Amino acid sequence: MLEALFRGWIGELKSKATQKLFLDSKHYHIFNNVFIRGNERLTQIDHVIVSKYGVFVVETKDRGGRIFGTKTDTQWTQVFPNKKVRFQNPLRQNYLHKMSLAEFLGIEHNKIHSLIVFWGNCEFKTPMPEDVVKGIYKYISYVKSKKQILLSDDDVDRICGQLKTVKKNTPILQGLRHAYSLKKRYDSTSICPKCGGKLLVKTSAKSERVGDKFLGCEKFPRCRYTKELK
């Protein structure tokens, strides 16, 4: 858990430095580590950038190795010479962030841009959509590529006011509390960490693992989360 928190912290620091250096504060208003509460669930967003060109919801990942994943995969894979690590599809993760923020701010979904930024010594091994980028140059290029005016000055002021209030009312240790609650949820053998559904003991029918027991979400096939039973 501490290692994951440290990697996340490093990724956020890199993003903050990039934003400060390359985005004009007159046109781009930046809010880091934003917590939105809705539908009885707390959503943590790494970075929110507000501009007349729309609101950018930025999810950062600090990872190495080779990265494999597609839009439709439930999980992506990080491959090293001697191990593989699975992690949640960040596109799906950020889609939920986008929906939560749109509802909270009271604006249309098409005025919010989703962006996934990878830091670290990683390499994409599958084609990635334009909103999944790696490094400073492509991060800033994506943000500045949005030229269509979507929000009025009044809209920008109102949204910034809402986010300032959220930041002001967020406890200093909220990030650690949120990370701990996610870890407990992931470690649970009864709650799906992806959608909150109930985990059920199931039997594999796949030829290479036929008869093996595993935990699967009750909401299958809508949710395809699984966990091995040790």
Image (cartoon, rainbow, N blue to C red):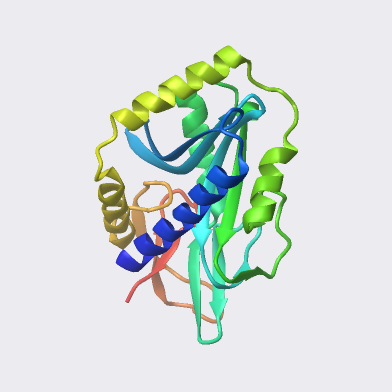
Q: Quadrant of residue 111?
A: top right
Question: Total marks drawn?
Answer: 0
In this view, 166 is above or below 171:
above
Depth check: give the residue in front, 161 or 132: 161
The residue positioned farthest toward the bottom in the image shown: 82
Q: Quadrant of residue 77?
A: bottom right
Give residue 42's position: percent from left, percent from top: 34, 38
The answer to whether residue 146 is visible is yes
Kindly identify the residue that appears in the image at 35 percent across and 24 percent down: 165
Left or right of 221 in this view: 110: right
Give residue 133's position: percent from left, percent from top: 65, 55
Give residue 91's position: percent from left, percent from top: 58, 50
The residue positioned farthest toward the top in the image shown: 154
Left or right of 146 in this view: 95: left
Kindly identify the residue that appears in the image at 55 percent across and 48 percent down: 92
Depth check: give the residue in front, 230 or 164: 164
Q: Quadrant of residue 150?
A: top right
Kindly identify the residue that appears in the image at 63 percent across and 36 percent down: 113
Image quarter where the N terminus lies is: bottom left
The answer to whether residue 222 is visible is no
In this view, 118 is above or below 139:
below
In this view, 73 is above or below 102:
below
Give residue 95's position: percent from left, percent from top: 55, 41
Depth check: give the residue in front, 126 or 113: 113
Kindly identify the residue that appears in the image at 39 percent across and 40 percent down: 43
Image quarter where the C terminus lies is: bottom left
